[in-house]
Amino acid sequence: MQRKIARMSPRPELIEAPLSRDELGALYRSLCDDPLYANIPGKIELDTWGRLLMSPASNYHAALQSRLIQLLGVLGGQVFVECSVVTASGVFVADAAWASAEFIQAHGFETPYTAAPELCIAVVSPSNSVKELYEKRTAYLCAGAREMWIVYPESKRLEFYASRGRVEASAFPVELSTLFG
């Protein structure tokens, strides 16, 4: 607990090393329980140093998240909007995700997940950088996701990634032709 307090301190000289995955998970859970963060618009993520990363989302972004959830419903299992996952690069929140019944049986609804659900999806916002998207893609796949999708609202296109890199099509049988309306 002492280490968490040092991370939240505005004094940078107290930051000695990146947080462990366990420490990041504990810090994220404490933010979820803290009433001071209850009404912050957008999602909160953490970098490896425990610093808050915040991303406000547009209504079109939210609509795409909702459409993705509807389309993923054909897979059964559990679908998520804003699914938190602790990774080696920080706590990231997938805009949409899908988990099998087996994943839910193993992990329940722990917050944040200590392993990535089978499918993690990022809906790109204007503030996202190429570096950030690469980092999230790598983090989710290294944390156990079978695939990571990146949705580009402006150009109305999708990219699919697996552990072997970019793939032409998803292995998940989801009809995506209606995603962009």
Image: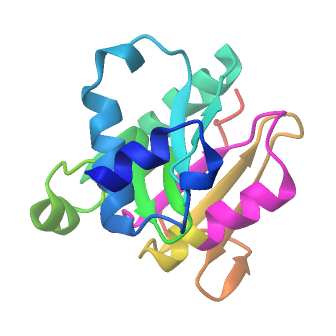
> Is residue 100 in view?
yes
* Outermost residue toward the top in this view: 39
Determine the residue positioned at 60% across, 41% down.
11
Q: Residue 114: x and y, percent?
A: 30, 65
Figure quadrant of residue 143:
bottom left
Q: Relative to residue 41, is residue 98 drawn left or right? A: left
Determine the residue positioned at 59% across, 22% down.
63
Q: Relative to residue 57, is residue 145 drawn left or right? A: left
Q: Is residue 117 magenta?
A: yes
What colouring method underlies this structural image? rainbow
Quadrant location, the C terminus: top right
Query: Between 88 and 57, which is closer to the camera in this rendering?
Result: 88
* Outermost residue toward the bottom in this view: 164
Q: Is residue 137 magenta?
A: yes
Residue range highlighted in magenta: 115-138
Q: Residue 157: x and y, percent?
A: 80, 48
Figure quadrant of residue 60:
top right
Q: Is residue 71 above or below residue 114?
A: above
Q: Is residue 173 above or below residue 66?
A: below
> Is residue 75 in view?
no
Q: Residue 12: x and y, percent?
A: 64, 48
* Outermost residue toward the left in this view: 105
Determine the residue positioned at 35% across, 33% down.
31
